[in-house]
Image (cartoon, grey):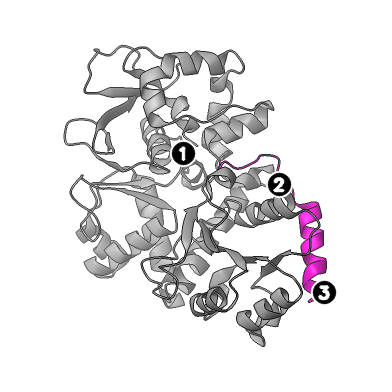
Amino acid sequence: MEAFYSTHTYLVEHVQSPIRRQLMDEIDWTHRLIGIKGSRGVGKTTFLLQYAKEKFGASRCCLYINFNNFYFTQHSLVEFAEKFCNQGGKTLLIDQTFKYENWSKELRECYDRFPDLHIVFSGSSVMRLIQDNTDIQDIVASYNLRGFSFREFLNLKADISLKSYTLNEIIHNHVQIAQEICSQVKPLDYFPAYLQYGFYPFFLENRNFSENLLKTMNMMLEVDILLIKQIDLKYLSKIRKLLYILMNNAPAGPNVSQLSVEIETSRATIMNYIKYLKDARLLNLLYAEDEDFPKKPRQIYVQNTNLMYVVSQGAIDKDAERKTFFYNALHAKHKVNASRYQNDFCIDHQYHFKCDNNHQHKSTSKLYYAVDEIETGNKNEIPLWLFGFLY
């Protein structure tokens, strides 16, 4: 046990978290079992360690463990939790949960046997904590940790502290909000950099960002999809090829028949692979308001603009970039669908948006424009960058 405490102390003392994630204040930490989901690279480990540092400091009542540790090949989680509780432990932070075979069953047993124990565990975005895990679905509180919002990136880069806004506030007060922000910083000076490399926190590391992101993408395929979904390794090349084709054509409606020919697999398998790529947060699927998987999506988007830059071999299509940013920013807290009209998106079955860089639009109460390359908007024209302040 002392070895775990020693590792915990070192990691907490050396955790580098230059910006406090908003999710830290959105979680109800009184829940006894909390799952933090997120795609690879968004900072789940740092988030857990930052919570330990902020809430518990040097107290031994909190302990971070990682299922990468070979200790758990011979010892059960329940056995470990019992020892921890007997030594006065109260909060157990568990990383790499999917690497432990019976994680959900033993989390349930820990929950039932140790009523004073709080457990916070991280999980891959492809793990369906509630839908697929009857062991814990009635007791777990699940949250999503996403990559940096533009607001978080801007606060970090400009060394300021700007708050987030709701979509309703942005729609109805965007002129005042944008003017207030622009009085402190010039968002457009930072926005292109965010689109290229600001979503994943590891841009702060002293490593080549593109190579690191490519490595992360391949880990998403090899571990988050193949391992967790239990797909044979021989199919990896097909999934990689499919992802590359879809990313280079996005945003676009998928031709499933043509893809099945190119990938040499069935239409049903193509649709399953697309769903897995979406769950791994490599793609976003845009459906009509009354449709969802397993139906074919209206359009497929790259999940975020950083992925566009690392995969593209040429110039980035600016219209695709605008729409990809908008979808990703809104998708964090809102329902995003294809609009019934000749627009790009319908948000929460209520607001219809078009994304462009045209600065002259007709005023209408039924349609809003997310406009690129403007600091402040007017009436139904809202600066595109401002949607990066939703979290």
Identify the secondary structure beneath mark 2.
loop
Task: Find the distance from the CA under tag 2 to the CA under tag 3.
Answer: 30 Å
Residue 57 vertical placement versus 223 (above, below): above
**Is residue 142 among what the camera can see?**
yes
Identify the secondary structure beneath mark 1.
loop
Q: Are marks 1 and 2 in contact (CB under 8 Å)?
A: no
Residue drawn at x 59%, y 67% is 96
Q: Which mark is residue 351?
A: none
Residue drawn at x 73%, y 46% is 206
**x, y percentage for residue 157?**
66, 30
Task: Find the distance from the CA under tag 1 to the CA under tag 3.
Answer: 52 Å
Q: Which residues are magenta?
A: 1-22
User: Which quadrant would the N terminus be assigned to in this image?
Assistant: bottom right
In the image shown, does 135 or 339 lie closer to the viewer? 135
Residue placed under numbered mark 2 in the picture: 205
Callout 2 amino acid: Glu
Q: Is residue 14 magenta?
A: yes
